Image (tube, rainbow, N blue to C red):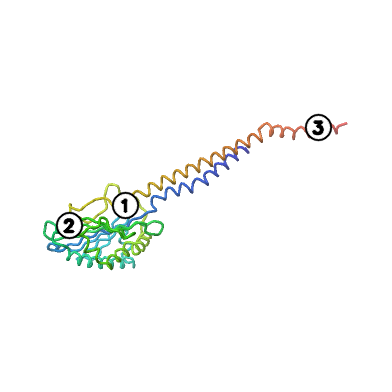
Amino acid sequence: MAKAAATGRNLSLVLFLILPLICLVSSHPTDTHSLSCKVIVRARPALRQPWYEVQCSLDGESFLQYDNHNKATPLGDLGKAVHDTQMWTDLIQRLEYLGQELRKILANTKQETADPSGHPTLQTIMNSKYKQEQIIDASWRFNISGKYFFILNTMNMSWTPFSLEARGIMNDEQFIKDLKVISTADSSYWLKELLKHQKEKPRPTSRAPDIIYLPPTIDVTPHPSTRQFPNNKESIIIAVVISIIIIIILIIIFIRMCVKRKCCPQGDSESGALDLTVKPLQREISSSP
């Protein structure tokens, strides 16, 4: 009985130490969140076609559709949840400002950057990554008529590549500063508020999230970042560390159990129990006449 109780206590100790580590690993992949806004600005749109369109998503789930005709439209449960919040109002104001500034820049774009219709189209994607209540990566990806592609990394304010066609944007210092604020400070606030309203539910695997249609000429070159797949590397490191800790704990418990068995063999306990029963009999015999 004592041996079984000791074994039970040891197993309880192992579970007590291992369960928090398992919870840490299971929660780690969801620590990083992404806010993305896809923008299209047309110099001369077709009849009844908006000159400005935006769609924003959180972790791939679209929650806002905006254009200069219909203004802002909430999408999905998340969009409905944040529709009447201050965050929604701030985001719309920023999108309106962004559209006006990009339209001015597009108007000054050279004619050789025009698309086959003869008028340039500017496409940009803002992507901000959020982890542990702070922005860890932020960038703006620009594409002019599917011909000229460049990236502004607002974490270190660098351009990739340094393109002459991007001069219309690069030369506007105040606008560049605003792009940094939008993708870092503003996005940090928006992400924090969005995550408060995000519902825990399984994501569909057969249906991709809704996105704005982009012309087939858009460049899909991957982001040249050195932070690719950060979650996979960190998960592997944490899993290895936890495995080592568990092995050490099990070895310590095994050694303790072996030491106890050597110090307190079963024979001693049985002989002790036998002595307790023999001594009273000896007293009775010695006391008898």
Classed neighbour count for the residue bearing mark 2: other residues with Cα under 10 Å, few (<14), some (14–19), many (≥20)? many
Snapshot quadrant of residue 277 = top right
Depth check, mark 1 against mark 2: the one in front is 1
Mark before the other along the chain sequence, 2 or 3? 2
At x 78%, y 34%, the residue is 279
Considering the numbered disc 3 on the image, is that residue within a helix, a strand or a loop? helix
Whether residues under marks 3 and 1 lie with C-beta atoms below 8 angstroms apart, the answer is no
How far apart are labels 3 and 1 at the CA level?
A: 87 Å
Residue 45 x %, y %: 14, 62
Q: Which residue is mark 3?
A: 282
Q: Residue at x 55, y 44 (%)?
A: 13
Look at mark 1 in the image and give the residue it sits on: 225
The residue located at (35%, 48%) in the rendering is: 229
- Identify residue type, mark 3: Gln
For mark 1, give the secondary structure: loop
Q: Which residue is mark 2?
A: 145
Element under label 2?
Answer: loop
Q: Report the mark closest to the observer, 3 or 1.
A: 1
Q: Is residue 240 above or below residue 60?
A: above
Residue under the image location 69 percent in, 33 percent down: 268
